[in-house]
Image (spheres, helix red, strand yellow):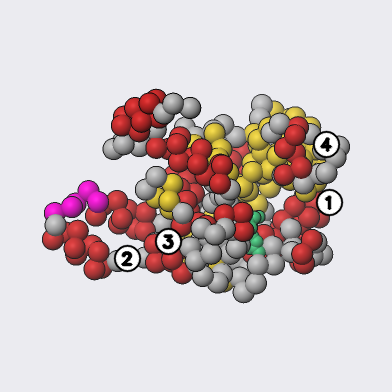
């Protein structure tokens, strides 16, 4: 049971980031100099996943263009002798294989994942929500695949959040079975009160193909959307599910404040600009 394929649901409307996301997909907003989705695609690649399946929808063609070859641009960069820039734009598209499938209506994350059923073909697979950008020494999905290969069960990435924020996440109830690993006993989507823990589900999943049947059995919830958390609760009745508290710093780049924090953190590490950027921040009288 090895993870080879990675699904990137990217068909949502990104309403938390309007008006920026009216005509530009949220996934294409730049974090310093790369679109958000590229960070997660690179994480997939560094975790040994070479088959990338992106679920797109209306107005998302920029994502396909981004990972496509741009002959005109490559010729121009060659002519101008900009070999390093050329390497940067060639790299990721050459290292992994991309497939695209469309979700006609944003009927929920569970629904978006189910669309990939035929492409996944009864294998375990990884899911990446590109909003969650995670700065980690060992790519988070690599950390998770190690757990997945040991346990042969679905693994959810979790992170401890302050009690005041549990209502914003899917929260697990779990029993610790090894360092950083919990056996999931229940999951609740955005609990209004009495959250069963402060372990929040973050946008990385290593899933068994059993999830597809579970999604088929899931009834639409709020706004007619098929929620992944509801499907996971159904899966939990049939299979073991584990949660893994990953090592790394996560930014919710799908909303304004998280996006700004991520830009500062990645800007301070960026080879070309880090020194000047640090000096600039230090000089701000705030
Ligand atoms: P979000 O809950 O972040 O929704 O979806 P969103 O539309 O992207 O953003 P907001 O909340 O309106 O600002 C989590 C992930 O699931 C995908 C989104 O693209 C995002 O990556 N998704 C969500 C789909 O692909 N299809 C859906 O129907 C819903």
**How would you rate the neighbour count of disc 1 (Cα within 10 Å): few for under 14, some for 14-19, many for 20 or more?**
few
Residue carrying label 1: 237
C-alpha separation, residue under disc 3 versus residue under disc 4:
40 Å
Badge 1 or badge 2: first in the primary sequence: 2
| Residue drawn where x is 41% and y is 28% of the image | 284
Disc 1 + disc 3, Cβ < 8 Å:
no
Residue 80 position, x and y percent, is 14, 57
Specify whether 227 is left or right of 37. Answer: right
| Residue drawn where x is 66% and y is 30% of the image | 180
Badge 1 or badge 3: first in the primary sequence: 3
Secondary structure mainly formed by the magenta segment: helix
Using the image as rendered, state which of residue 38 and residue 237 is in the foreground. Answer: 38
Residue carrying label 2: 69
- Residue bounds of the magenta highlight: 81-85
| Residue drawn where x is 51% and y is 70% of the image | 59
- Can you name the residue that lies furthest to the bottom here? 104
C-alpha separation, residue under disc 4 versus residue under disc 2:
48 Å
| Residue 179 in view (yes/no) | yes
Residue 227 badge: none
Residue carrying label 3: 97
Where residue 96 sits, quadrant-wise, is bottom left
Q: Does residue 143 lie above or below 68 as drawn?
A: above
């Amino acid at each position: 049971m090895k993870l080879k394929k990675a699904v990137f649901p990217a068909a949502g409307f990104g309403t938390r980031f309007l008006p920026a996301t009216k005509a530009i997909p949220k996934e294409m907003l730049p974090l310093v100099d790369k679109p958000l989705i590229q960070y997660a695609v690179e994480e997939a690649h560094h975790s040994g996943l070479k088959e990338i399946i992106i679920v797109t929808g209306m107005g998302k063609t920029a994502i396909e263009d981004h990972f496509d070859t741009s002959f005109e641009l490559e010729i121009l960069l060659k002519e101008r002798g900009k070999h390093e820039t050329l390497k940067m734009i060639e790299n990721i598209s050459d290292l992994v294989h991309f497939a695209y499938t469309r979700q006609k209506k944003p009927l929920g994350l569970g629904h978006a994942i189910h669309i990939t059923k035929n492409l996944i073909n009864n294998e375990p697979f990884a899911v990446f929500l590109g909003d969650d950008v995670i700065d980690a020494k060992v790519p988070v999905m690599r950390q998770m695949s190690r757990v997945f290969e040991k346990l042969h069960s679905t693994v959810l990435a979790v992170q401890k959040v302050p009690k005041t924020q549990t209502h914003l996440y899917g929260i697990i109830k779990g029993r610790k079975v090894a360092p950083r690993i919990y056996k999931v006993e229940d999951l609740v989507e955005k609990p209004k009160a009495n959250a069963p823990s402060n372990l929040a589900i973050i946008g990385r999943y290593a899933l068994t193909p059993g999830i597809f049947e579970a999604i088929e059995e899931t009834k639409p919830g709020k706004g007619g959307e098929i929620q992944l958390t509801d499907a996971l609760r159904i899966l939990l009745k049939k299979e073991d599910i584990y949660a893994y508290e990953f090592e790394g710093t996560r930014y919710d780049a799908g909303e304004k404040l998280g996006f700004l924090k991520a830009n500062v953190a990645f800007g301070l590490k960026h080879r070309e600009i880090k020194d000047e950027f640090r000096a600039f921040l230090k000089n701000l009288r705030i």
